[in-house]
Amino acid sequence: MQLVIDSANIEKIRKLNEYYPIDGVTTNPSIIVKEQKPFLPLLKEIRSVIGEEKELFVQALAEKAEDIVKEARYLRNTLSGNVVIKVPVTKEGIKAINQLKVEGIPTLATTVYTPMNAFLAAKAGADYVAPYVNRIDNLSGNGVNVVSEITQIFLRHNLSCKVLAASFKNVQQIHNVCLAGVHGVTTAPELIEEMIGHPSIEANVKQFKKEWLDLYGEESMNLISTK
Ligand code: E4P
């Protein structure tokens, strides 16, 4: 199961990539705009932080299929390493995904709201679909159910497309899509940090240390140098 950072903030990406088992970085136009920097150097900097192997997801901006395809070729030629092109699941987007499949350019179908959006994208050759869990919830839908149904449809019909669930507002939503069998999640740095945000962990570590110190004393705290 993949864990992907949904951010273009260099410092946050650097820190998370150092501490956690991160598989890649997703961006979208809003996420890039938030950094207020020229976008190509920013994407290159993200690449240099995560290395060449991990996937960097970059969204096409064009609306017509042939222009999306041109942008995808440009991004893949300009950025090094493993670059996946995000394409919204519009009618033109589905056409572009199909064309990019023929050219061997990997895609993630984004702005997925229903299982049928996902089915069409997978049939067209998308490598990933990204259902928007929290945005679906905000429309009085059930984001976790949508993810669960997409996962079941792909499994039942042997579609090799992966479900990378996106748009989370809390760790419980992430937990629930994990249970639903999702292939990966992409989420904001703050939520990745909150995945280990349980007060008992710190309290337990403190108690272990206290009991150890009480018996062996301060000088024994370095296990390696203690005889
Ligand atoms: C990622 O691929 C999506 O663009 C992103 O997760 C959307 O998240 P939001 O609903 O929190 O903006």
Image: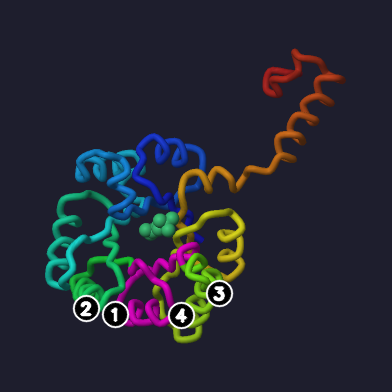
- In the rendered image, which residue does mark 3 sit on? 145
Separation of residues labelled 3 and 2 (CA atoms):
27 Å
SS at badge 1: helix
Separation of residues labelled 3 and 4 (CA atoms):
14 Å
Q: Which mark is residue 95?
A: 2
Which callout, 3 or 2, points at the residue further toward the start of the chain?
2
Q: Are marks 1 and 2 in contact (CB under 8 Å)?
A: yes
Q: Amino acid at mark 2?
A: Lys
- In the rendered image, which residue does mark 4 sit on? 154
At which x and y percent is residue 103? 18, 71
Q: Are marks 3 and 4 in contact (CB under 8 Å)?
A: no
At which x and y percent is residue 45? 27, 39
Q: Quadrant of residue 193?
A: top right
Which callout, 4 or 1, points at the residue further toward the start of the chain?
1
Q: Amino acid at mark 4?
A: Phe
Separation of residues labelled 4 and 1 (CA atoms):
13 Å
Q: Quadrant of residue 73?
A: bottom left
For the C terminus, the image quarter is: top right
Residue furthest toward the bottom? 157
The local crowd at label 4, few if under 14, some if 14 to 19, many if 20 or more residues have their Cα within 10 Å, is: some
